[in-house]
Image: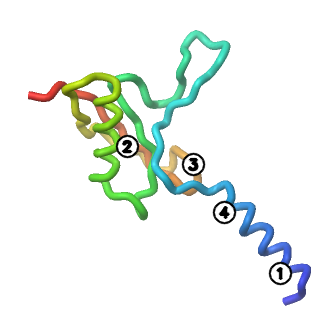
Amino acid sequence: MSTLKLSILLFLCALVSACAEFAPFEDRRREPGTEYVYVGASKLGQPAICYNPLFYSKEEIKERADALCKSHQKNTHAEFVDVDYFTCRLFVPSKAYYKCVVDK
């Protein structure tokens, strides 16, 4: 393999890995200038979390959803609703939907 081809390959790998984030995150974005401050699938009381199922278990994602529910309202926990595949980023393809319910 020539030096030029190897350099191009390494550059492309670095470019892709620099944009890759495997950590789960809440699908919620601020959209200035719109009627609604936040856009995305996640809403107060209904967190939606993007994650990669190869690196994170459903239990870890539920813990993150529980923390989001508790940050919005005390004495609540997350209850799983649904999951979508290939609706988030390339390296974080799954999106889990939860709803916050009051602790009994």
Residue visible at 54% across and 14% down in the picture: 36
Residue visible at 55% across and 57% down in the picture: 91
Rendering coords of residue 65 (x, y %): 33, 39
* Labels 3 and 4: the sequence-earlier one: 4
Question: Label 3, on which residue?
Answer: 89
Q: Which is more foreground, mark 4 or mark 2? A: 4
Q: In which quarter of the image is residue 46?
A: top left
* Labels 4 and 1: the sequence-earlier one: 1
Label 4: few (<14), some (14–19) or many (≥20) C-alpha neighbours in 10 Å: few
Residue visible at 52% across and 29% down in the picture: 40
Amino acid under label 1? Leu
Question: Label 1, on which residue?
Answer: 6
Q: Do the residues labelled 2 and 3 touch (CB within 8 Å)?
A: no
Q: Which is more foreground, mark 3 or mark 1? A: 1
Q: Are marks 4 and 2 in contact (CB under 8 Å)?
A: no
* Labels 2 and 3: the sequence-earlier one: 3
* Labels 2 and 1: the sequence-earlier one: 1
Question: Label 4, on which residue?
Answer: 17
Rendering coords of residue 72 (x, y %): 34, 24
| In-image side of 42 versus 98 (left or right) | right
Q: Quadrant of residue 15?
A: bottom right
Q: What element carries label 3?
A: loop
The scheme the figure's colours follow is rainbow
